[in-house]
């Protein structure tokens, strides 16, 4: 027997996108008695049954009672009386108290299913709303509530991925608390990207070849030529200021696997993460039209098919998933089309399917990207921020890239 209890109930229509159903179900909205729901009923046709199961799994993780009801849409869309009957039967499974607090989220489903569901709710004088995904708002179609209001971005990356059938697998993603030294390193590296990008390849080489013994790493000896290179020495000084790296005679030394990952390119991922997080705080303080939600780095993903991939940075904003790959390596203009840069581009293209609506993807590269790779990225609708002066303008890029609602 299905568990029931008194409290708000959302009846949702399932389609290919999960966020229009997921975000309202996780929202706490003081000015409305319908949020958050204690129970969710998912109505779907047979084509979207698997999607409904994914969505149920995500909601159950938040202690919400979820039932799935399959609606037979195998009839002429004009003949909706059967659909109305099926939806009415689902509505009658609610207790009297639940019926008083039931609301229809009519954002998903086909036209016939949506029309039939709205008809059932209007006949019962119950409220209906739509999610205006473009403007991240709930808009009421019927009921006492009249004004639209913003949807809190309470969904986590885990919620969004599981709601679309994807799983996060170990090692788990990280939500960073960056130190002042880490932030300052990123800012210095971005400010000096024009000259540092010429020598970071040599630095990466030393870091990757550093030998480890009992947690202690030693790289080098650094060549006399590089020790006379002002740009290289200035860049090394920036890393030494973090306290993670130091000189030992002509060698660069550091300790621990985490530091090794940081020095071998992880610092750039943290820089991108930090700029997004800074923008999130500023927009919250300014009551900006959109608010950035969950931000994570190092997301390891398994698709329903079992294929796996990893993304450097992911964040949610305005009902959309943003995915970013960060690189400090060198991409040769003469590289084969199926080389390393191609692998990166096709990975981002694959990851677009994680979001609803379609995710937005970008490459952040500390060094410039060859023209042929930029052109392929453009064809795949993948944005590129690469080399000087792009990296120094990363915040400006993000302000333009993140979609902002249209003001009325």
Image (cartoon, grey):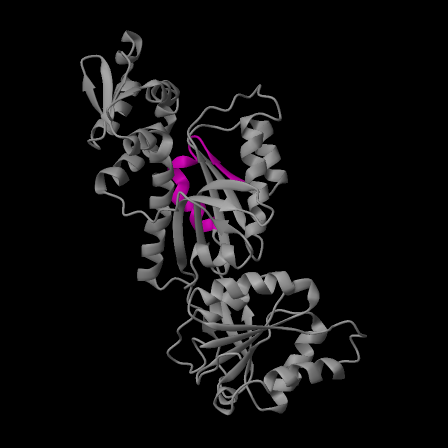
Question: Does the magenta run of residues contain 398?
Answer: yes
Is the residue 300 above or below the residue 44 in the image?
above
Tell me where residue 228 appears, x and y as whole percent: 26, 11
Can residue 135 be seen at all in this image of the molecule? no
Identify the residue shown where x is 62% and y is 61%: 50
- Residue at 39 percent across and 73 percent down: it is 28
Residue 114 sits in quarter: bottom right
Q: In this picture, is 238 found above or below 317?
A: above
Of residues 352 and 165, the one nearer the viewer is 165
Image coordinates of residue 403 in percent, x first then y, are: 50, 55
* The magenta segment: 383-401
Left or right of 110 in this view: 214: left
Where's residue 352, x and y in %?
Answer: 57, 47
- Identify the residue at image location x=50%, y=24%: 331
Residue 291 horizontal side relative to residue 189, left or right: right
Is residue 246 highlighted in magenta? no
Residue 41 falls in which quadrant of the image? bottom right
Q: Percent x, y for residue 223?
A: 29, 9
Residue 321 visible in the current orientation: yes
* Image: 119 above or below 383: below
Vertical comparison of 59 with 85: above or below = above
């Amino acid at each position: 027997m299905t568990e029931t209890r008194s409290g708000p109930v959302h009846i949702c229509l399932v389609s290919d996108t999960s966020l229009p159903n997921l975000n309202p179900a996780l929202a706490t909205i003081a000015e409305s008695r319908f949020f958050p729901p204690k129970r969710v009923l998912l109505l779907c046709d047979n084509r979207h049954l698997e999607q409904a199961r994914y969505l149920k799994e995500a909601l159950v993780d938040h202690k919400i009672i979820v039932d799935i009801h399959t609606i037979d849409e195998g009839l002429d869309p004009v003949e909706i009386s059967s659909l109305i009957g099926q939806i009415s039967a689902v509505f009658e499974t609610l207790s009297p108290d639940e019926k008083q607090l039931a609301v229809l989220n009519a954002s998903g489903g086909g036209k016939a299913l949506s029309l039939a569901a709205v008809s059932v709710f209007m006949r019962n004088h119950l409220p209906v709303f739509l999610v205006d995904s473009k403007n991240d708002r709930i808009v009421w179609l019927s009921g006492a509530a009249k004004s639209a209001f913003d949807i809190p971005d309470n969904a986590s990356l885990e919620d969004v991925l599981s709601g679309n059938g994807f799983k996060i697998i170990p090692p788990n993603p990280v939500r960073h608390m960056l130190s002042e030294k880490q932030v300052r390193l990123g800012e210095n590296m971005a400010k000096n990207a024009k000259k540092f990008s010429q020598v970071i390849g040599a630095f990466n080489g030393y870091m990757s070849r550093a030998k480890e013994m009992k947690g202690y790493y030693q790289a080098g000896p650094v060549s006399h030529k590089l020790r006379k290179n002002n740009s290289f020495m200035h860049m090394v000084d920036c890393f030494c200021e973090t306290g993670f790296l130091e000189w030992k005679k002509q060698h660069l030394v550091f300790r621990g696997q985490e530091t090794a990952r940081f020095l071998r390119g992880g610092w750039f991922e943290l820089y991108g993460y930090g700029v997004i997080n800074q923008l999130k705080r500023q927009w919250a303080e300014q009551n900006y039209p959109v608010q950035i939600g969950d931000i994570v780095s190092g997301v390891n993903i398994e698709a329903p098919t079992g294929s796996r991939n990893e993304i450097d940075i992911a964040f949610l904003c305005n009902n959309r998933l943003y995915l970013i790959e960060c690189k400090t390596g060198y991409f040769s203009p003469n590289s084969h089309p199926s080389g390393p840069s191609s692998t990166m581009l096709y990975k981002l293209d694959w990851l677009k399917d994680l979001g609803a609506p379609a995710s937005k993807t970008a490459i952040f590269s500390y060094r410039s990207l060859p023209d042929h790779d930029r052109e392929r990225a453009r064809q795949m609708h993948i944005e590129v921020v690469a080399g000087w002066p792009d990296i120094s303008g990363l915040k400006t890029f993000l302000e333009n890239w993140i979609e902002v609602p249209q003001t009325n």
